[in-house]
Image: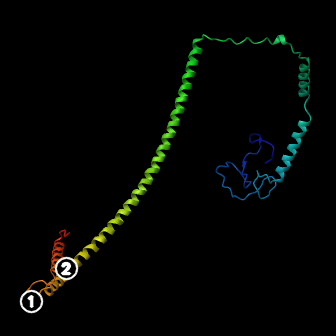
Amino acid sequence: MALGHFKRQCNQIYGTCKTCGEQCADRKIHNCSQIEKCVHCQQNHKSNSLKSPVGKSFRIELTKKLLNLNNHPTTSSSSYNNNNNNNIRKYIYDISNFPPLPTAQVLTNNPMMIKLDDLMTKMSEIKDQISNAALKHEKFEQFILEKNQNDKRIEEHLDTVTKNTVALKKDVVQHSLLVERHENLFMKVLLPIFEDLFTVICTQNQDKKGNPLDADLKYKLERYRVQMKKASEGKLFF
């Protein structure tokens, strides 16, 4: 297996595995041992590896040959360059060989140009309308964004108010219980005590004949008893 030729130019009958270096009739069904062995230098690397010293030598020699060919141009290429240089020297510029271009004609009454101008004007107007619509759209988007932010703040305030309302209801229930407890204490304990006390005072405010000793005190006691009775009945006593 030599270097420097293509597959169709190779004189070898069977193909060669680039990994193990063994020859095989069909490399597709070849059972490779996966043990690397170069067929050029017999070292432990693949045959197409750049580490092969044989391959390196071949590339060096090929490079030298190519450089030598570039440094020694052929006779045909030299003669072509000389002829080309002679033709350049013989060329003389003549303005008559380059006649001037005709002047541009201004078509003022061309209906096609008029239609194109109208079309360009309308397109410009449409562009302005699109720009205005885009500006309005941006303002509308900004409005929607601010609205969403305000809605979010309102929802937060509503949540706070709801929480405060729940807390207030709890406080009201607690105060109602306290008021009811105090009312029960007043109605069931204090009022009977006051009635008994007023009865004792009225008895002490009478002489042996049952006449009041202090008429003003008797009047006040009677008024207090009426007010307590109304209070026990849930009526206004002012």
> At which x and y percent is residue 185?
23, 79
Residue drawn where x is 74% and y is 42% of the image: 7
Amino acid type at circle 1 is: Lys
Residue drawn where x is 82% and y is 50% of the image: 55
> At which x and y percent is residue 225?
16, 77
Colouring mode (rainbow / by chain / secondary structure / one colour):
rainbow
For the residues marked 1 and 2, what is the alpha-carbon distance in whole angstroms? 28 Å
Among the 4 quarters of the image, the one containing residue 32: bottom right
Residue 88 as seen in the image, left or right of residue 121: right
Query: Given contact means CB atoms under 8 Å apart, are the residues at marks 1 and 2 in contact?
Result: no
Residue 111 as seen in the image, left or right of residue 71: left
Among the 4 quarters of the image, the one containing residue 82: top right
Among the 4 quarters of the image, the one containing residue 166: bottom left
Image quarter hosting the C terminus: bottom left
Residue 83 as seen in the image, left or right of residue 203: right
Give the mark nearest the N terminus, 1 or 2: 2
Q: Label for residue 158?
A: none
Q: Is disc 2 placed on a helix, strand or loop?
A: helix
Residue drawn where x is 62% and y is 11% of the image: 108
> At which x and y percent is residue 236?
19, 68
Q: Residue 116 versus residue 199: which sits nearer the camera?
A: 199
Q: Nearer the viewer, mark 1 or mark 2?
A: 1
Amino acid type at circle 2 is: Leu
Q: Which residue is mark 1?
A: 208
Of all residues shown, which one is farthest toward the left? 209
> At which x and y percent is residue 202?
14, 84
Q: Residue 117 versus residue 178: which sits nearer the camera?
A: 178
Q: Which residue is mark 2?
A: 191
Q: Is residue 195 above or below residue 122?
A: below
Residue 66 as seen in the image, left or right of residue 142: right
Q: Is residue 120 above or below residue 210?
A: above
